[in-house]
Image: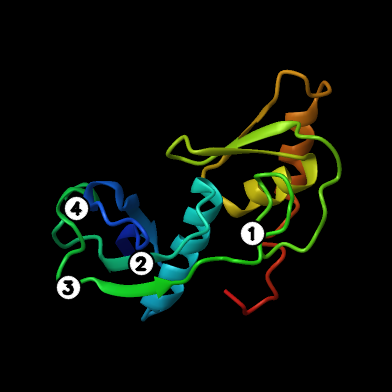
Amino acid sequence: MTARFAFLVLRTDEPDPDRQGLRSSTTPGPPGPAPDPRAVAETVAQETRLARAYWGPMTVGIWPADTDPTPAQALRDGMPDGAATHAFGEVTHRRECCPAAHPDDPTPCDGPLVVTVLDRQQAGADGCAHHGARLLASLDGGRVYALPDAPDGAAIEVFKVAGALRPFPWAERGDR
């Protein structure tokens, strides 16, 4: 059985505690007998950056999902005492590209913005077909919608391309 983790993501550049929370939920850990919380935190951090288009510093707290507090309680009350916390610095090397492009993805846009990609929490980013597909492939439960002025079939094409990609295709295997 795959372990499930609860997580809380806080921005560390925001002094107001009521505005620090970026995400809280649960996620499956990687397969194996003893999942590494750091690997889970790295995945959560990358997904948060993609879904929220937030490139500043953050802390990700991870704890077993079957223990208290729930993610919603942690978002309200702050990082639980028993959480394994992992700090991630600001991403400073973003280049000018569409909002769906990950900052570590070196590939250029392939044209104008044609789709919006949404994650499970309804956070989204507009993107070109190329980066929209790469973002969709990297999200668990993501959805894609064509923008109003997109060519017919744009969302379907992005969906098909995403289905043929591995998650985080810009990362070297083993980097995550």
Mark 1 — residue? 167
Q: Secondary structure at mark 3?
A: loop
Task: Name the spot of residue 163 as percent of width and height, x first.
Answer: 71, 47
At label 2, the amino acid type is Thr
Which class describes the residues within 10 Å of circle 3: few (<14), some (14-19), or many (20+)?
few
Residue 104 in view: yes
> Would residue 172 be found to the left or right of residue 10 on screen?
right
Foreground pick, 55 / 147: 55
- Image quadrant containing the N terminus: bottom left
- Numbered tag placed on residue 82 in the rendering: 3
Which class describes the residues within 10 Å of circle 4: few (<14), some (14-19), or many (20+)?
many
Q: Earlier in the sequence, mark 3 or mark 1?
A: 3
At label 3, the amino acid type is Gly
Figure check: 100 above or below 45:
above
Q: Nearer the viewer, mark 2 or mark 1?
A: 2
Mark 2 and mark 3: span between their CA atoms? 14 Å
Q: Earlier in the sequence, mark 2 or mark 3?
A: 2
Mark 4 and mark 3: span between their CA atoms? 13 Å
Q: Nearer the viewer, mark 2 or mark 4?
A: 2
Mark 3 and mark 1: span between their CA atoms? 30 Å
Q: Are marks 4 and 3 in contact (CB under 8 Å)?
A: no
Task: Name the spot of residue 142 as percent of width and height, x first.
Answer: 56, 41
Mark 2 — residue? 59
Which class describes the residues within 10 Å of circle 2: few (<14), some (14-19), or many (20+)?
many
Q: Are marks 2 and 3 in contact (CB under 8 Å)?
A: no
Mark 4 — residue? 70
> Would residue 81 be found to the left or right of residue 54 on screen?
left
